[in-house]
Image (tube, helix red, strand yellow):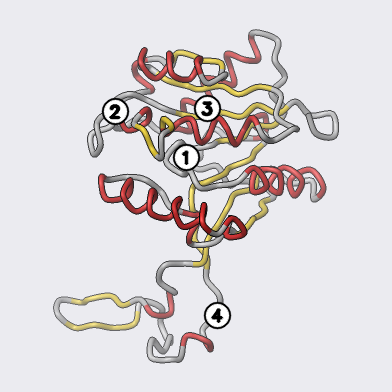
Amino acid sequence: MISGNRVIAVVPARGGSKSVPGKNIRALAGKPLIGWSIEVAQAVEEVDRIIVSTDDEAIAEVAERLGAEVYRRPAHLATDDALVIDALRDLHATLRREGEPADIMILLEPTCPLRASEDVHQCLVRMVEDHLDSVATFKPADLNPHRAWRLDGTSPTPFIEGANPWRPRQELPSAYQLNGAVYVFCPERLPEDINGLLFGRTGAVVMSHERSVDIDVEFDFTLTELLMEKMNREPSSR
């Protein structure tokens, strides 16, 4: 709880991964992938409940063994085309029917295992202290938009009109992108007509490139394990 608000951490983990079958419970550095997100939520003292939303029995068993609650996701919210935000809306409605206020929700995607509990804590504090509706984590942009191009046929032109892609990096304005690691929001204020989790009065917490890894394909597992080995040798990097 924070400032009288009940805080629910949600780890969405459907069973139908196509890029890496069984991804959400595959071992990463000796721990099921969802275990890294559950462990981070357990380390945030403001979190009142940790819920894994899944349609998969194997994932449910692992989540419960690791100390999380499990809410079964309806099949129509676990398809390849289903949006996480709709699963969150469904879960919030279920919790309200059960008498759970769920004043603040935290979304922790299992594919972002290198986030730290401090990243989550910072998002919570920023939301409450600044009276915001939603907060998300960002990283420095992989490509500054002033360096982007568009192709009209075979003719390249700067993507941003008037931009000079040849300017030195140090002279370009700072640019950031969502890294998907942490979303904190007030579910009661979530508009029905949007499919994103940044809405209303928004805030940002910046994470490093190194800790912003997002596991999507087989190569990402290898890269993440290498980063974890590096972090274990250099604890201050986390």
Q: Please, what is the three-letter code of the amino acid marked with disc 4?
A: Pro
Horizontally, residue 168 falls left or right of residue 75, namely right
Mark 2 lies on residue: 22
Where disc 3 sits, the SS reads helix
Q: Earlier in the sequence, mark 2 or mark 1?
A: 2
Q: Please, what is the three-letter code of the amino acid marked with disc 2?
A: Gly
Q: Residue at x 23, y 34 (%)?
A: 18
Q: Earlier in the sequence, mark 4 or mark 1?
A: 4
Where disc 2 sits, the SS reads loop
Mark 3 lies on residue: 88
Q: Earlier in the sequence, mark 2 or mark 3?
A: 2
Extreme residue toward the front, this view: 233
Q: Residue at x 52, y 27 (%)?
A: 88
Q: Earlier in the sequence, mark 1 or mark 3?
A: 3
Q: Please, what is the three-letter code of the amino acid marked with disc 3?
A: Leu
C-beta proximity under 8 Å, tags 2 and 4: no
C-beta proximity under 8 Å, tags 4 and 1: no
Instruction: Find residue 1 and report its horizontal and vertical position in percent.
Output: 78, 29
Where disc 4 sits, the SS reads loop
Horizontally, residue 153 falls left or right of residue 90, namely left
Mark 1 lies on residue: 195
Rounded to the nearest whole Å, what is the CA distance between mark 1 and mark 3? 11 Å
Q: Earlier in the sequence, mark 3 or mark 4?
A: 3
